[in-house]
Image (spheres, rainbow, N blue to C red):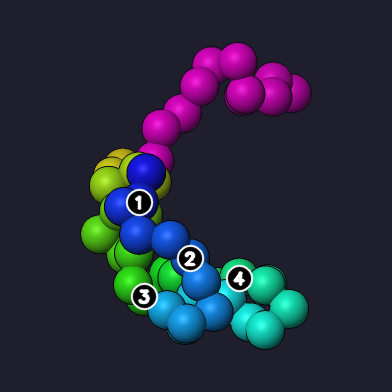
């Protein structure tokens, strides 16, 4: 999905190779918005009837 690697040098990973969520979210916001953006959807299968 992304063309660059997540590395410590790029600032996306900690020294223990954990993802820095704030940095990844900031740097890849357009991609994240493209995947998850838009109006929320509803599904009849998910509605609980009383």
Question: Looking at the picture, does residue 45 appear above or below residue 20?
Answer: above
Q: Earlier in the sequence, mark 3 or mark 1?
A: 1
Q: Residue beneath label 2, please? A: 6
Q: Earlier in the sequence, mark 4 or mark 2?
A: 2
- Residue drawn at (43%, 69%) of the image: 25
- x, y (%) of residue 33? 31, 54
Label 3 or label 2, whichever lies nearer to me, is 2
Residue 7: in magenta span: no
Q: Residue beneath label 3, please? A: 26
Q: What residue occupies the far top of the structure in this picture?
A: 45
- x, y (%) of residue 50? 74, 23
The answer for how far apart the CA atoms under marks 3 and 2 are is 13 Å
Label 4 crowd (10 A; few <14 / some 14-19 / many >=20): some
The answer for how far apart the CA atoms under marks 1 and 2 are is 9 Å
- x, y (%) of residue 24? 45, 70
The answer for how far apart the CA atoms under marks 4 and 2 are is 8 Å
Q: Work out whether residue 5 or residue 29 is closer to the camera in this orientation and state it.
A: 5
Judged from the image, the secondary structure of the residue bearing numbered disc 3 is: helix
Q: Residue beneath label 4, please? A: 19
- Say whether marks 4 and 2 touch (CB < 8 Å): yes
For residue 49, say whether it is visible: yes
For residue 37, say whether it is visible: no
């Amino acid at each position: 999905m992304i063309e660059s690697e997540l590395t410590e040098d790029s600032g996306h990973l900690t020294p223990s190779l954990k993802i820095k969520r704030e940095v990844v979210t900031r740097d890849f916001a357009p991609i994240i918005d493209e995947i998850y953006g838009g109006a929320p959807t509803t599904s009849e299968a998910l509605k609980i009837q009383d």
